[in-house]
Image (cartoon, grey):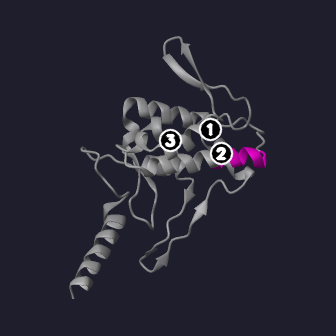
């Protein structure tokens, strides 16, 4: 769990998925006169190793090859595309679910019973990418218990951050209504008045 997932009160059972989806920052807006800097926490194999190690998802001395990095980035891209869909439409979008299913095949999970804990999912991978199976397990568990429907992508085109919708009716559209919501509403208001004038 990262500082951001704690700050935004993302449930522990979705924290790695949230962090993974947000490991790329594509925001492109100006706030108080400062242009937001975009970034990618997984820009190379070493960065992916560090990201996994920071969350306890990687054994010490793990090695990531360029091909493994590509597999991880494909998973992230397809998870983000899935979360971009409205929760009610996610399972109906054949293209998005097809791409995600293909990416998920690289991270097979095994169900096992553990004394005192009940059934759990564990990875069947034994390489440095095994830790990403935790992200896949969170995606699976969240879809089963319904919490995944609260993980959404901000509707603001200049943001696209994934956020956890804590509102009671789960109808939020923006990661922060005071920022992204305000910008969108202000832009709509100005366009409406420009068109009317």
Instruction: Look at the numbered discs 1 and 2 and tell me whether their residues touch, using CB distance below 8 Å.
Output: yes
Instruction: Look at the numbered discs 3 and 2 and tell me whether their residues touch, using CB distance below 8 Å.
Output: no
Crowding at mark 3 (Cα within 10 Å: few <14, some 14-19, many 20+): some
In the picture, the disc for residue 132 is 1
Crowding at mark 2 (Cα within 10 Å: few <14, some 14-19, many 20+): many
Nearer-N-terminus badge (3/2): 2
Instruction: Look at the numbered discs 3 and 1 and tell me whether their residues touch, using CB distance below 8 Å.
Output: no
Q: CA distance from mark 3 to mark 1?
A: 19 Å
Q: CA distance from mark 1 to mark 2?
A: 8 Å
Residue on which disc 3 sits: 97
x 56%, y 44%: residue? 99
Residue on which disc 2 sits: 72
Which of label 3 and label 1 is nearer to you?
3
**Mark 3: which secondary structure?**
helix
Which region of the structure is painted magenta? 65-73
Q: In the rendering, at what x and y percent does residue 83 appear?
A: 45, 48
Residue 156 visible, this orientation: yes
Which of label 3 and label 2 is nearer to you?
3
Residue 58 occupies quadrant: top right
Which SS does the magenta portion mostly show? helix
Residue 67 belongs to the span the image colors magenta? yes
Residue 154 occupies quadrant: bottom left
């Amino acid at each position: 769990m990262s500082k951001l997932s704690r700050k935004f009160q993302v449930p522990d059972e979705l924290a790695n998925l949230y962090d993974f989806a947000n490991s790329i920052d594509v925001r492109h807006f100006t706030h108080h006169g400062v242009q937001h800097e975009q970034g990618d926490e997984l820009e190379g194999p070493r960065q992916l190793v560090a990201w996994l190690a920071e969350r306890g998802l990687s054994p010490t001395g793990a090695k990531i090859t360029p091909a493994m990095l590509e597999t991880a980035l494909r998973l992230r891209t397809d998870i983000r595309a899935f979360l971009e869909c409205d929760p009610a439409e996610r399972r109906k979008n054949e293209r998005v679910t097809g791409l995600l299913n293909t990416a998920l095949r690289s991270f097979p999970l095994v169900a096992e019973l553990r004394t005192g804990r009940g059934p759990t999912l564990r990875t069947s991978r034994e390489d440095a990418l095994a830790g990403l199976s935790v992200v896949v397990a969170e995606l699976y568990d969240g879809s089963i218990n319904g919490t995944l429907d609260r993980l959404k992508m901000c509707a603001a085109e200049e943001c696209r951050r994934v956020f956890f919708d804590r509102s009671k009716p789960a109808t939020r559209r923006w990661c922060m209504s005071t920022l992204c919501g305000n910008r969108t509403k202000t832009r709509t208001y100005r366009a409406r008045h420009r068109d009317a004038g």
